[in-house]
Image (cartoon, rainbow, N blue to C red):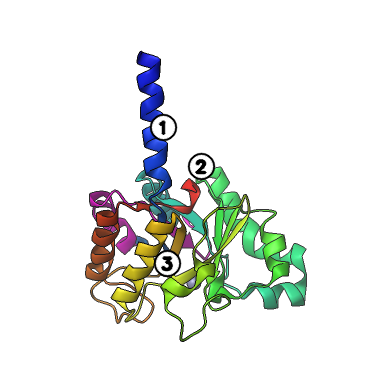
Amino acid sequence: MKRFLMLLASMFCSSSSASEGTLCLTFDDRYFENWEKMIPLFKKYDARVTFFVFQQLDDKSIASMKALQSAGHTIGLHGQNHLRASDYLQQHGPMTYLKNEIMPQLEICRKNGIKIRAFAYPFSQRSSETDKELFTVFDFLRTNCTDVKKKEMKLAEADGCFVKKVGRKQLFYGFPASGNFNMEEVKTAIKRAAEDNAVLVFYAHDITENQVPSHHISISQLEELLKYAKSLKISICGLNEL
Ligand SMILES: [Zn+2]
């Protein structure tokens, strides 16, 4: 009887999680101070997110990355020098690209117990050749959605942004939830991800009320998104959890 009830419970859990979809919020560069301040807000909405970090990693950055990881968030890499991957690879070849741009950050993370599975392209500049090289090191890559979404298209209509089955190696086309983005357009897309049980990825940089929003998201915009996502029961998680 007990085994039957456990089986029933597991069937119920898997069917409910299968229909929820996944929202991946990602934040780029190195706004550690403001990112760390958001830990309680993410916790309030059961949300884990991804932080893509660039530049040489010093002790202060490592401490922040550890704090974010301890709070359940994913740390990903964004390049030692924030270089355009495709240009650099063409000029210097794949070995030099990996050696100079990827390995220095990766080695420091490994030494410090920071689990890395994902990379976000600086300036979203990529090619199939850079994907191939980076997939030897990472499981997930993130670029922007210009290859799969025409300018006049609403995000909810851009099929390429919705990943129904995450591959062992997966490229995600993210949409900017930054600047003066259209909140309704973004919410409609999140609803589609929930209904289709798909993964949908957004990106921004800093999280603050004080910055001109161009590449950033304000705390109030972020909270509105989190609140809406939670109301749909879509899972909000980091790329390491996929
Ligand atoms: Zn960047």
Residue 87 percent across, percent down from the top left = 69, 78
Q: How far apart are marks 3 and 2 (CA)?
A: 26 Å
Based on the displayed image, in which of its 4 quarters is residue 38 positioned? Answer: bottom left
| Total marks placed | 3
In what element is the residue under mark 2? loop
Dots 3, 2 in contact, CB < 8 A = no
Contact? badges 1 and 3 (CB < 8 Å): no
Give the magenta range.
33-58
Q: Residue 11 carries which label?
A: 1
* Mark 3 / mark 2, whichever is N-terminal: 2
Residue at mark 3: 202
Q: Can residue 191 be seen in this view?
A: yes
Could you tell me which residue is drawn at 46 percent across and 57 percent down? 198
Q: Is residue 191 left or right of residue 50?
A: left
Is 141 positioned to the left or the right of 228 in the image? right
Q: Which dot, 1 or 3, sits closer to the camera? A: 1
Vertical relation: 177 (above or below) 73: below
Magenta stretch containing residue 45, yes or no? yes
Q: On the rendered structure, is 69 left or right of 113?
A: left
User: Which structural element holds mark 1?
Assistant: helix
| Front residue of 91 and 230 | 230
- The front one of 86 and 111 is 86
